[in-house]
Amino acid sequence: MHPDRKQRLQIVVLILVAASVAAGLIIYMLGQNANYFYTASQIANGDAPKDVFIRGGGMVVAGSVARESDSLAVEFQVTDGGANLVVRYAGILPDLFAEGEAAIAAGRLNEQGILVATEVLAKHDEKYTPPEVAESMNAAYKAKQQLKAEIL
Amino acid sequence: MNWNWFYRMGSPKWFYYTTSRWLPWLGVMTLCLLVTGLVWGLAFAPEDAKQGNSFRIIYLHVPASLLALAGYFLMAAAGAIGLIWRMKLSFMVMKCAAPLGAVLTFLALFTGAIWGKPTWGSYWVWDARVTSMLILLFLYLGVLALQYAFQSQEVGNKASAILALIGTVNIPIIYKSVDWWFTLHQPSTIKFTEAPSMHPDMFQPLLVMILGFYCFYALALFMSVRVEILHRERKTAWVRDLVSQVAEERVGVNS
């Protein structure tokens, strides 16, 4: 390679390395601050500030969704497997909001550690399945669980 | 090592005449793949168990996002080749890749917003994936703006290429953002190392759409580079000959 071109190649590599180092440092500094939400465990540990607008998220605990009969008020729990977070919200929930699915609630933590939310978003996973396949998978899963229960 | 093939490829004239033979084929392939993929994906693929029909926007969202990222690598590589080898053609490729990438990034963000409302419950969120994708749009627009920010084409080329190179660090960040941080955006469905987490009946049309978008990208890039070649090489003998030849043919048809 021509020496001039070699030198320019070195400059290009230098630009790439410098930019990568800068980006790496920024990402390192941002760390967990770039997270969109706190998990239920982080909130239970006291990592999330009180009386500041935050987001908490996790899987909606099955059977935890309790609605008021005369208003839009709803209370539910989300979990990340370690701890549960109680969310209180008054408003319309997204279509994909369901027990056993992930949800993210935005609002403030009150004194009891309950997240009083002004917005609830549904988080869906990266899996896509036709309804018939999902149904048969659920049926197979239930049959397996039943079999297990019978054996035990 | 013999670099002759490389320098021949860098000749605008060679590029112009070679691509004119490819264009019809690319056009036919693009049309066939996009029509097949769209009809298959939108009308015949099964709906999703949870999201229903709204998931179908994935057939635009994923190919557009993928090409927006891949196109940035192409633009930055073209800029680097231009900087190192001072090839005119590669700077033209870089310049033409910028608006194309910007449009694809916008399409990815726009289809994402349309998808976000019925599924997440919000058009826009400032999570790591969506925000880093917005930065990609600004990088594309920055590269494009720098092209026109200088009196001299040469200085503009260099400035654009350097910004394009610096911006490449954003591409792995976009790609890994859903794994590094808690985001509202779900992780990738299509992975390099594993089978896609999608039913084959839904994945096959997506694959057709991705191929169709690659062909469309090549087609659009070639067409706009050819216009750029004619413009920048307008004073050369071969472009003058070409133009007068086309003009004569036009006159012949009209009379």
Image (cartoon, coloured by chain):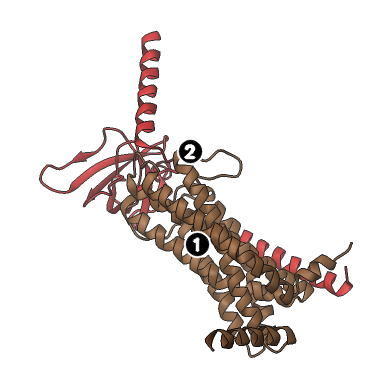
Chain colours: A red, B brown
Q: How far across and how far down the image is residue A145, in percent? A: 38, 19
Inspect this view and state whether residue A33 appears: no
Q: Residue at x 36, y 42 (%)?
A: B47
- Residue at the disc numbered 1: B133
Q: How far across and how far down the image is residue B126, in percent? A: 42, 60
Quarter in which the N terminus of chain A is drawn: bottom right
Find residue A2 and report its image quarter: bottom right
Is disc 1 surrounded by few (<14), some (14 to 19) or many (20+) residues within 10 Å? many
Looking at the rendered structure, the kind of residue marked 1 is: Met
| Foreground residue among B147 and B41 | B41
Looking at the rendered structure, the kind of residue marked 2 is: Pro
Is disc 2 surrounded by few (<14), some (14 to 19) or many (20+) residues within 10 Å? some
Secondary structure, mark 2, is: helix
| Foreground residue among B247 and A22 | B247
Q: How far across and how far down the image is residue A71, in percent? A: 13, 48
- Residue at the disc numbered 2: B200
Q: Give me the chain letter of mark 2.
A: B
Q: Give me the chain letter of mark 1.
A: B
Q: How far across and how far down the image is residue A124, in percent? A: 39, 45
